[in-house]
Image (tube, rainbow, N blue to C red):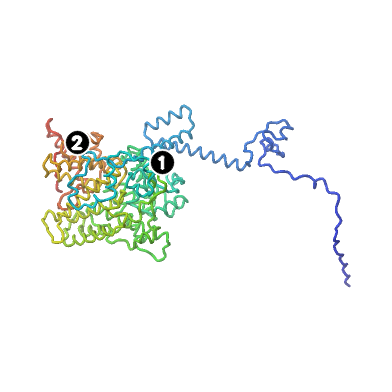
Amino acid sequence: MSHPLRPLLPNSPNPPRVEGLSQTQHRAKRVATPAACEACRKRKSKCTAERPRCSVCIERQTPCEYTTLPTETHLRAQKRKLTNLEIKCQAYEDLLGIMRSRPDDETAQVLQRLRVGEDVQTVVKAIQDGDLLLQLSLKPELRFRYEFPYIRQMPDHLNQWHNPYFQTTLYEKTGVLSSQSLVSLKTLRDIEDESQKMYLVPYHATELVDSRISSMSVSGWTTVSSDNHMLRVLLQVYFVFEFPFHPYFHKDLFLEDMLAGSKRFCSPLLVNAVLGAAWHGYSKMKSRAEYWLPDNLGYRFLAESRRLFELEQTHPTITTVQAAAIINLTCNLNGIDEISWMYTYKSLEMAKSMSVFSPNPNETREWQLVAGTTAWCLFNWQALATFHTFQPPLIGDPPARPLPDVDDAPAFFGEIWVKYPHGREPIPVFNGLVFRAISQFRVIMNEVTKQSFSHPRGFNRMPLRAALEYRSRLLAWYGNLPEPLQARSIALPSHLKIHMYYHILLINLFEPFTQMGYVHAEANPSTIVSHSKACLETLMRIYYLRHGFESLDNTLVHPLHLLGFSALRDISSVEKGSSTYEAIRSTLVLCAKGLWEQGRNHYVAEVVFRLFKHCLSIDDVLLVEEIIEVEESDSRLGHMVQEIRSLWPIGIFSMADEGGDRTLNHFIRWWDQHMQDRAQDSTPEQDLTSTTLPTYPQR
């Protein structure tokens, strides 16, 4: 039997108020303190946290000390101490990098400052700030123009032809303002159009504008140096001076991954290869061209990149491909291209295995950018290298990846932004336009090389009609150049070199026909060659007037030495003492100066300079030595013989003279033997300097 449930009473609307509350309920809530003093922490007692002494320590009459700041917890204090310790360790790492990379006289001064008790961080900061001040005082050498080293005027014979480069804005600026030696700071500040400064100030005075580089830790990508300041400077050198003409990778994706620590499009191998290439432009180091010195950081960067390449080549990535091409270029500048060609071969082999040259429908947008850039850069590099060494192309056809229009796809090319001294905003160097123009030009160059050489230095003389067809295509390319790259508008080194190589290719095409007396109704080969040589010299002179020759330019030595050896051949047929003779002498001196100054950046330029100087007459050698302070050493010739391994043909535009071996290898060994023979046979009155261009021996 179930019992009924007791009914529940309704809740009272006015519950009884409890009058008596416990003492603990009336106690005020304790205010939390950020951190207790050390004595209370040790006793594990409640600390009131007054400063300088808490009430507990006052009551107990014990010492009261704090290891935290007033508003800081113990955890935050530990983080602060760790950060300070990391900064201190970084200072010691930077100091070690400075001691490794600086000349002996600078390291001695650093040691002296440390021994008298200066703090390490203070010394490092002073050095880095001093470097910045030195860059600001020396780098922007604000000349309106450089002065020609021998005769100050442009040679008259250069303007006998229809020479478009006398009507360029760049020449007008350098010519009109030649009476002034320095750009006033007020003049620079008053220029409203920043793009006009490229016509008034040397390119080496610019500063790269990219916030990613200034905030990244480059030392995490290399074991060679921990000097982040110097490493960031090297990255800036690379992107300002080397990248515009040889962009082997996509700059933006490389820097973004480098900053984020990602290894998709950045790797220690690629970073070391870049730093090794940029070291040649690090003007603070006088020995930067002496790549064989183990204490030279350029040697270490290159050795580290080659070591990493050996480890990666069995399982390569896209950065392995890019780094191999950069290593090859760096070795070429060191004069060991005979050895370094394997990096180009392996780079192309790896690229083909990754389908870099042919698109895949499943590719991501980022891979399309990286693969497209890499494919065209590899093609462009092998086209240039095989053209200059008279070898069959390594790639017969251009990549199957079409080049987009710069306006339609600016992200494909990326841009380099630089700022001139006292500039209000950065300006572009037109990286995309340069990339596209060079790629289109190298397609034609590659076809010319392919038709001219079926096997190494096996010259196939093409019909004149074929050469004229190539000339028509080159003229169409020249006429369709975008406005910033038109002859009227060119200003930067990469712009000027596009035009230089255009005329070099024309000379290469038609020089073989000049010796055979070919005449065609459409064009005269001799006229084409003479006109292009005049244009090439004009471009070289304008380049010097605006930018000088001392800054790194790894593709300038080729047109420089071609112009110099061409002038050597021309001067032999001109009456001595005439105005034309003196004009050609001024060209010889200018080319010698350019080769010598570039030789401070990379060794092959110094080698070519010494060979070129040896080919001058005694009077011209004395003239060169009056103008250029050449460092002479009895060991230089022996060192050249020991170090150079180069298949680069010297002093010739084309293989017009069949059968001769004109490689740098052959020339140096012949020159070594020639000098030994003359030393044995000479009398005290004889001079070992040749008065004519040496006759190259046949194989």
Quarter occupied by the N terminus: bottom right
Q: Which residue is mark 2?
A: 623
- Work out whether residue 567 or residue 62 is closer to the camera in this orientation and state it: 567
Quarter assignment of residue 44: top right
Q: Is residue 344 above or below residue 676?
A: below
Residue drawn at the location 76% of the way across and 44% of the way down: 28
- Work out whether residue 147 or residue 645 is closer to the camera in this orientation and state it: 147
Residue drawn at the location 87% of the way across and 65% of the way down: 9
- Work out whether residue 201 or residue 581 is closer to the camera in this orientation and state it: 201
Q: Earlier in the sequence, mark 2 or mark 1?
A: 1
Q: Is residue 578 above or below residue 536?
A: above
Residue 636 is situated, as x and y percent measured from the top left of the image, at 24, 37
Could one spot residue 273 in this view of the protein?
A: no
Residue 62 is situated, as x and y percent measured from the top left of the image, at 70, 31
- Whether residue 226 sits left or right of residue 71 in the image: it is left
**Helix or strand or loop: what does disc 1 sit on?**
helix
Quarter assignment of residue 453: bottom left
